Amino acid sequence: MCDPISITIGVMSMAASVSAANAASDAQDAAKVESDRAAVQAKVDADRQINLQQLQNDEAAAVEAFSNDARTKELVARSVVAGGESGAIGNTNDAIIANVMRQGLEANTMVTQNLGRETAQLGETRLGQQSTYQSRINAVSGGAGVSFGQVLGAAAQGAQTGMSVRGGMNSIGKNKAGGVTKIKANTGNVSANNYTDYSNVS
């Protein structure tokens, strides 16, 4: 018949094992939350930098295109004035003006192409950041909780602990029933007949 003490210790051992497993799962959940938070923040910061770079590229391209248009208009106006002053009329002056406008268009086309390449590069950077973000999210998993198998394992361990305690208590009980064995040191037999008094010998 099982005694209450061994049962209680076994149950306590089981509860401690389950509690430890649950604490480990909670700690893993906390690590997952912190890892995800850091991953999200890193992506937000990276996206902000990419968006800022895109904005700067767009603004620079717009300023350059505006400058090209203004320069083209100025050159066209000068060509018209110069043609009028020099008396150049017809195809000659028209050809000059057309050439100036063509150069302006080519300059703006180059601006647009450069902006397109920069935008594409930033798009690749965004994809890389998304991949990095996903990798960081997947790198740390959440806690699995306490599984049924862990509970069974803890129960088995608790039962074993209880049985060990019961066995130890039984051993103590047997020792009490049989008394305590006393061991007396052997000091040897000293006989009074064999004793010689040498106290008077000088």
Image (cartoon, rainbow, N blue to C red):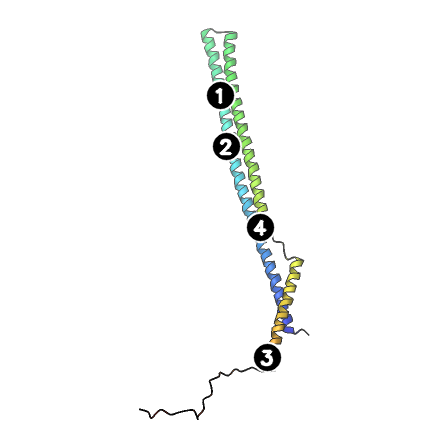
CA distance separating discs 2 and 4: 36 Å
Q: Residues within 10 Å of mark 3 (few under 14, many from 20)?
A: few
According to the image, label 1 marks what residue? 70
Pinpoint residue 167: horizontal percent, then vertical percent.
62, 73
According to the image, label 3 marks what residue? 175
The numbered mark, 3 or 4, whose residue comes first in the sequence reads 4
Label 2 amino acid? Gln
The numbered mark, 2 or 4, whose residue comes first in the sequence reads 4
The image's mark for residue 32 is 4
Q: Secondary structure at mark 2?
A: helix
Q: Nearer the viewer, mark 2 or mark 4?
A: 4
In the rendered view, does 124 fall on the left or right side of 4?
A: left
Label 3 amino acid? Asn
Q: Nearer the viewer, mark 1 or mark 2?
A: 2
In the rendered view, does 59 fall on the left or right side of 14?
A: left
The image's mark for residue 56 is 2
Q: As displayed, is residue 194 above or below residue 136?
A: below
Pinpoint residue 178: horizontal percent, then vertical percent.
60, 82
Pinpoint residue 118: horizontal percent, then vertical percent.
53, 30
Q: Nearer the viewer, mark 3 or mark 2?
A: 3
Pinpoint residue 164: horizontal percent, then vertical percent.
62, 70
The numbered mark, 1 or 3, whose residue comes first in the sequence reads 1
Q: Secondary structure at mark 1?
A: helix
Write the residue at 49% across / 21% down.
68
Mark 3 and 4 residues: CB-CB less than 8 Å, in contact? Answer: no
